[in-house]
């Protein structure tokens, strides 16, 4: 008996194999380092604990206390009628659909509540209540004003003149905030979509009314005994997901651009190797750029740099993790130190003097790891605190933003001297160009027709670019860190598919050096390589954080508008992917892509496998309604091939499959010519 107990506790201590956990050397080295120091990480926990086999299938219901009712697929499969039921009679399809749309509610709430915070800060800026935030990008303000029904011109003495910028900002702030809870109407941004798509949504009755309402309604409908039709449930999921993509997320992106500047291409680096042993290292982690923007400003001030020097450091090195990283990367070139799965490792370097977190994707275990080192772990958001007693909470408020940021940066500097001798920073880092967006794609790919998407479309039509893929999303400790991200992206660009990336996929690509123009010659097919070389862009364009997936929606809309590739997003030779997803936000993003007409493939697993009818509905039937549909493919090469097959299907439907064949023949011809030339 005692022996048995010992055996099982040994089993709990099962440790990860660093080489099997990640394709990234810095990550492998740091996992090994953690084990050497006896510090447990997510990789060890993933080795020790298996995921629940029923939850994974999406068929565990705990929506009332008669359950949890667990309805796994029988091992032998289902023959004849599926008689599985919960106590209330809920079928596996109902349960999986309810769980699925609750994930959408979680994801849409996260993105949109982030957006709301930004809108509130924007309101204080418009009211001039804060010295820290000002309207930085007036051009962007004017461009979004029209979509929110805000006049940018006024009549004075019978003449149209420019309206006062402050007045415009105030009304934009009011109209934007209204989108979360207005009592009547529909979300104003929905009309930014191509007209046929808007009509599809209208016809199917999925136009969101306001952002909060769609999320609340999911919670209502999934309560015991309400909506018991998986088709009707997913319809509400669609409405909430659209309220995220074309609402909360898009507003977050737009208002952040107005406040902090629209990103333009900027050079930087990525991976743990950007940390510097002789500098004060401050890492910001989470999603909202509202605080981190000010931390960047303060950390770069003469006052703070001098203060750091007075404490024996050579300077201050800022770094980011997750999407806060992407936000300050795209606007200031601050390098990400890693993706979601590297957050504990950044502290384990022993050189992280402060880790400042805001909201989303933050491991609670950071506090346990920080305990083993000198790192100050600082929470800053009233809705995101930690229970461990070594965590410092400095609640951030836009009305005294500089004060808060100064306190945080000073605390990090003062902590520099407390490092123990055990600093180990891996050397590896990648160089990158990030900061692309709807505006800069237009500029770079505008060619001779600068200021339009015409040249991009032309290159798609003539087949140099086979298609466009959005590859986004998280890491997941159930798969090898970054392996699927990088394999999928490489397979796509090898086949002349240009990739738009956001989130942790963007950071992964940066770490692997895929975000430089030079990579085009190494990894791309001949057509895409030629385009990248001509215009000097990387084959993988980093568009920012996860709320910036809205930039992908708008870029796709611009492509439709430029003409020649059909009349709707669903006509485009395009596909979406999240190879290593894990968050509820990813499900919301995936679903708004699907509902916007995009074929979207997820890696790892989908929580629908235990409900085959529902699974089939979202993977096949939805295409008939929106033109887009879900798919699941854990094998990364097959994953990319499915996307390419869809792209080719769309090219064929557009009648542009032949032009592509000609382009390939041209390249083959050229090679033949070269070969015969060399022989001669
Ligand atoms: Fe989080 Fe946005 Fe996912 Fe990365 S990609 S793990 S959600 S940080 Ni958004
Ligand atoms: Fe079970 Fe129905 Fe309650 Fe869910 S709602 S736990 S299926 S009884």
Image (cartoon, grey):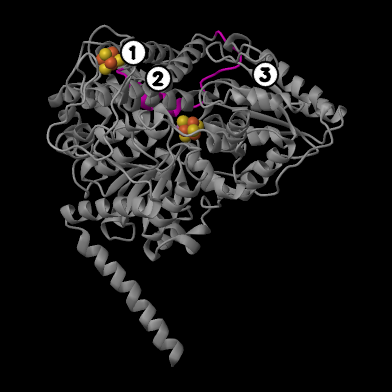
Q: Considering only vertical position in the picture, is 282 above or below 106?
A: below
Q: Residue 176: x percent and y percent?
A: 37, 15
Give the residue at x 38% y 10%.
174
Badge number at residue 405: 3
Q: Residue 605: x percent and y percent?
A: 36, 39
The answer to whether the residue labelled 2 contacts the one labelled 1, judged by CB atoms less than 8 Å apart, is yes
Q: Considering only vertical position in the picture, is 53 above or below 176?
A: below
As drawn, the residue found furthest toward the bottom would be 680
Badge number at residue 411: none
Residue extent of the magenta highlight = 129-149
Relative to residue 623, is residue 324 drawn left or right?
right
The answer to whether the residue labelled 1 contacts the one labelled 3, judged by CB atoms less than 8 Å apart, is no
Q: Earlier in the sequence, mark 3 or mark 2?
A: 2
Residue with the mark numbered 1: 212
Relative to residue 435, is residue 351 drawn left or right?
right
Q: Considering only vertical position in the picture, is 246 above or below 538?
A: above
> For this rendering, which residue is in front, 224 or 420?
224
Q: Residue 179: x percent and y percent?
A: 33, 14
In the image, which is nearer the foreground, mark 1 or mark 3?
1
Can residue 22 be seen? no
């Amino acid at each position: 008996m005692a022996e048995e107990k010992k055996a099982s506790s040994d089993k709990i201590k099962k440790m990860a194999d660093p080489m099997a956990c990640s394709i990234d050397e810095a990550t492998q080295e740091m996992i090994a380092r953690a084990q050497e120091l006896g510090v447990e990480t997510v990789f060890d926990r993933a080795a020790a604990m298996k995921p629940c086999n029923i939850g994974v299938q999406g068929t565990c219901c705990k929506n009332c206390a008669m359950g949890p009712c667990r309805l796994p697929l029988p091992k032998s499969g289902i023959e004849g009628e599926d008689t599985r039921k919960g106590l209330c009679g809920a079928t596996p399809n109902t349960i999986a659909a309810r769980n699925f749309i609750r994930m959408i509610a979680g994801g849409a709430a996260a993105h949109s509540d982030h957006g709301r915070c930004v809108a509130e800060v924007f309101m204080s800026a418009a009211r001039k209540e804060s010295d820290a935030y000002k309207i930085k990008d007036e051009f962007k303000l004017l461009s979004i004003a029209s979509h929110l029904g805000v006049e940018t011109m006024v009549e004075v003495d019978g003449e149209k003149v420019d309206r006062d910028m402050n007045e415009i900002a105030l009304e934009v702030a009011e109209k934007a905030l209204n989108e979360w809870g207005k009592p009547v109407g529909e979300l104003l941004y929905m009309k930014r979509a191509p007209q046929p798509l808007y009509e599809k949504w209208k016809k199917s009755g999925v136009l969101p009314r306001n952002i909060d309402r769609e999320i609340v309604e999911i919670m209502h409908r999934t309560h015991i005994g309400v909506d018991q039709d998986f088709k009707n449930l997913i319809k509400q999921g669609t409405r909430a997901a659209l309220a995220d993509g074309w609402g909360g997320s898009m507003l977050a992106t737009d208002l952040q651009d107005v406040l902090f500047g629209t990103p333009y291409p900027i050079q930087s680096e990525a991976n743990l190797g950007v940390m510097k042993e002789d500098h004060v290292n401050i890492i910001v982690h989470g999603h909202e750029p509202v605080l981190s923007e000010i931390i960047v400003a303060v950390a770069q001030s003469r006052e703070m740099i001098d203060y750091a020097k007075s404490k024996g450091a050579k300077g201050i090195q800022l770094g980011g993790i997750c999407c806060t990283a992407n936000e300050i990367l795209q606007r200031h070139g601050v390098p990400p130190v890693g993706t979601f799965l590297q957050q504990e490792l950044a502290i384990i370097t022993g050189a992280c003097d402060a880790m400042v977190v805001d909201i989303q994707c933050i491991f609670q275990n950071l506090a346990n790891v920080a305990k083993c080192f000198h790192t100050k772990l600082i929470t800053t958001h009233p809705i995101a605190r930690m229970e461990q007693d070594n965590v410092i909470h400095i609640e951030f408020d836009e009305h005294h933003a500089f004060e808060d940021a100064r306190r945080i940066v000073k605390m990090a500097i003062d902590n520099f001297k407390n490092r123990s001798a055990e600093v180990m920073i891996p050397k590896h880092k990648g160089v990158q160009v990030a900061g692309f967006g709807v505006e800069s794609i237009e500029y770079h790919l505008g060619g001779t027709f600068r200021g339009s998407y015409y040249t991009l479309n032309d290159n798609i039509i003539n087949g140099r670019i086979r298609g466009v893929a959005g590859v986004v999303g998280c890491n997941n400790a159930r798969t090898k860190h970054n392996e699927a991200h990088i394999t999928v992206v490489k397979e796509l660009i090898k086949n002349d598919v240009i990739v738009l990336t956001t989130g942790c996929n963007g950071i992964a690509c940066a770490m692997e050096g895929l975000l430089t123009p030079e990579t085009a010659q190494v990894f791309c097919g001949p057509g895409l390589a030629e385009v990248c070389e001509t215009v000097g862009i990387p084959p993988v364009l980093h568009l920012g954080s996860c709320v910036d997936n809205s930039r992908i929606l708008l870029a796709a809309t611009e492509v439709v508008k430029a003409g020649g590739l059909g009349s709707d997003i669903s006509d485009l030779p395009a596909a979406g992917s999240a190879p290593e997803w894990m968050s509820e936000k990813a499900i919301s993003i995936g679903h708004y892509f699907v509902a916007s007409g995009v074929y979207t493939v997820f890696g790892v697993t989908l929580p629908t496998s235990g409900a085959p009818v529902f699974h089939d509905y979202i993977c096949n039937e939805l295409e008939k309604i929106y033109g887009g549909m879900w798919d699941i493919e854990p094998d990364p090469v097959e994953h990319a091939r499915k996307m390419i097959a869809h792209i080719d299907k769309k090219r064929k439907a557009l009648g542009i499959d032949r032009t592509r064949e000609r382009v390939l023949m041209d390249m083959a011809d050229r090679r033949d010519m070269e070969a015969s030339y060399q022989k001669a």
